[in-house]
Image (tube, rainbow, N blue to C red):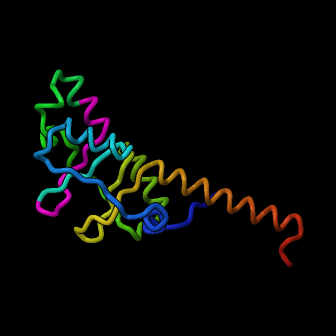
Amino acid sequence: MEISGTVRQILTAKGPSVITTTPEATVFDALTLMGAHNIGALVVIKDDKVVGIFSERDYSRKVILQGKTSHTTHVADILSHPVITIGPDDSIEECMECMTVHRIRHLPVLQGETLVGVVSIGDVVNWIMHAQRHAIQQLTGYISGQYPG
């Protein structure tokens, strides 16, 4: 099945809201923010520029497993960078390929250098499920004679 659509369409469906943090924030504060919003990653912003991404994976591998504490470690010390991004006019297939190749679950979406959203693997899965449901409905309608032909 061909996956059609653009990253912009996913952002339109989910909304452009992006929760961010700063490099100076403590890991504990970043985790608290993630918990409050039920999200798995935060885009890290400094001087209105995307400088990295902080995820649950960063926490588990770079804090817990290294014996650091979330109250004293700063996001800057463990964020993932350089950050891999995608554009709003990129296809959903390009988005999936980027996530697969780089083994990441969250992609900041940049228009030029401006952050316009974040796409997660969950967003992509939801898009695909919706597209499949739509295709099934169309095929069912065609087979049952609901469409002129």
Which residue is at the far front? Answer: 36
Q: Looking at the rendering, which quadrant does residue 85 occupy?
A: bottom left
Residue 67 can be seen in this image: yes
In this rendering, the answer to whether 60 lies above or below 103 is above
Q: Name the one closer to the observer, 30 or 149.
A: 30
In this rendering, the answer to whether 57 lies above or below 80 is above
Which residue is at the far right? Answer: 145
Name the quadrant of the C terminus.
bottom right
Q: What x and y, as percent, mark residue 119?
A: 40, 56
Q: Residue at x 13, y 43 (%)?
A: 76
Q: Residue at x 14, y 44 (%)?
A: 25
Q: Per the image, is 29 magenta?
A: no
Q: Name the one closer to the observer, 120 or 5.
A: 120
Tell me where the magenta segment starts and ends, as one range: 47-61
Q: Per the image, is 48 magenta?
A: yes
Q: Along the horizontal axis of the image, is 18 left or right of 82?
A: right
Q: Looking at the rendering, which quadrant does residue 12 occupy?
A: bottom left
Q: Looking at the rendering, which quadrant does residue 1 occupy?
A: bottom right
Residue 82 can be seen in this image: no
Q: What x and y, as percent, mark residue 148?
A: 86, 78
Q: Along the horizontal axis of the image, is 30 left or right of 93?
A: left
Q: What x and y, as percent, mark residue 36?
A: 33, 43
Q: Along the horizontal axis of the image, is 35 left or right of 132?
A: left
Q: What x and y, as percent, mark residue 90?
A: 41, 67
How many discs mark residues in the rendered view?
0
